[in-house]
Amino acid sequence: MRLPFQTLNRLRYDRIIWVLFLLITVGILLSSVTRKKNSFADGVEVKVVPLEGGEKLISEYDVRQGLLSAFGNTLEGTELRYLDVERMERVLEEDPFVRDAETYVDQHNILHMEVEQREPLLRVLDSKGGNYYLDPEGKKMPPSKNFAARVLVATGNIAAYSSTFREKKRSSLNDVFQVAQKLAEDDFFSVFVQQIHVNPDGQIILVPLVGDQKIILGDSKKLDEKLERLKIFYREGMPYAGWQTYQSINLSFADQVVCKK
């Protein structure tokens, strides 16, 4: 079936109009992008997401100073075409306190930076003079000048930190880290135990917040079973004996809780 001549002309006309519309739209978009790139950053907004308790190990000022050192300027007034947001994120994430960083420019040409902090799990004071935090992933952080995190402390005969400590079969640092993880997962032990100590013989000892007794774990093997025994003892035995009765509670023997007065 052949279409009438007028209908064909109409179809051609509509197609031309549609192509022109697309070309104009693309032109406007390209022009907007060009104008955006040629415009300047009118300001920089930095947000550090607080830790669960509201603390900040790194401040907004620290973030700005880090970027100033890396880029040589304050970024305000910089042409947007020269703002490498991906590089900014990489620079921020190199900071030991930063877990993740997001950077973007909004429609008002304001450069936004949002920083997620690493959450300290354990503070380590090792036998080599090391003084640092570990986060739940085993990442190392130095002490913060802004805030001293109230976390579990590990002391004593602990090996110096290395980035591969979690991969080592025999590592006193990995042992205390595993213990700290287990304690943090338990609602009772996470607030009851304040210190992990490794004595010269390599025994792991827990120091509770209440009472003067030492809790001897021995090694880091069968942690779940040892901590369950300890919890049963505190629930069923300690109320009758009293918190000050025992000098030590030894869990290093299989299926036993050996107490010394």
Image: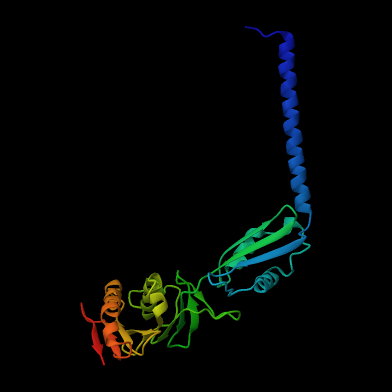
Direction from residue 50 to residue 172 in the image, left or right: left
Residue at the spot 51% in from the left edge and 71% down from the top edge: 119
Res 72 seen here: yes
| Quadrant in the picture for the C terminus | bottom left
Compared to residue 80, the image places residue 120 above or below, namely: below
Q: Residue at x 41, y 75 (%)?
A: 190
Q: Is residue 203 visible?
A: no
Residue 14: x and y in percent read 73, 21
Depth check: 149 or 178 in front?
A: 149
- Residue that protrudes farthest toward the front in the picture: 240
Rendered location of residue 44, percent (x, y): 72, 64
Q: Position of residue 243 (x, y in %)?
A: 33, 87
54 or 99: nearer the viewer: 54
Image quadrant of residue 254? bottom left
179 over 80 or under it: above or below:
below
Tally of marks: 0
**Quadrant occupied by the N terminus:** top right
| Picture coordinates of residue 174, whole percent (x, y) | 38, 76
Q: Give the quarter of the image for residue 246.
A: bottom left
Residue 46 lies, with reference to residue 195, above or below; the image says: above
214 relative position to 87: left or right: left
Q: Quadrant of residue 255?
A: bottom left
Q: How is the image coloured?
A: rainbow
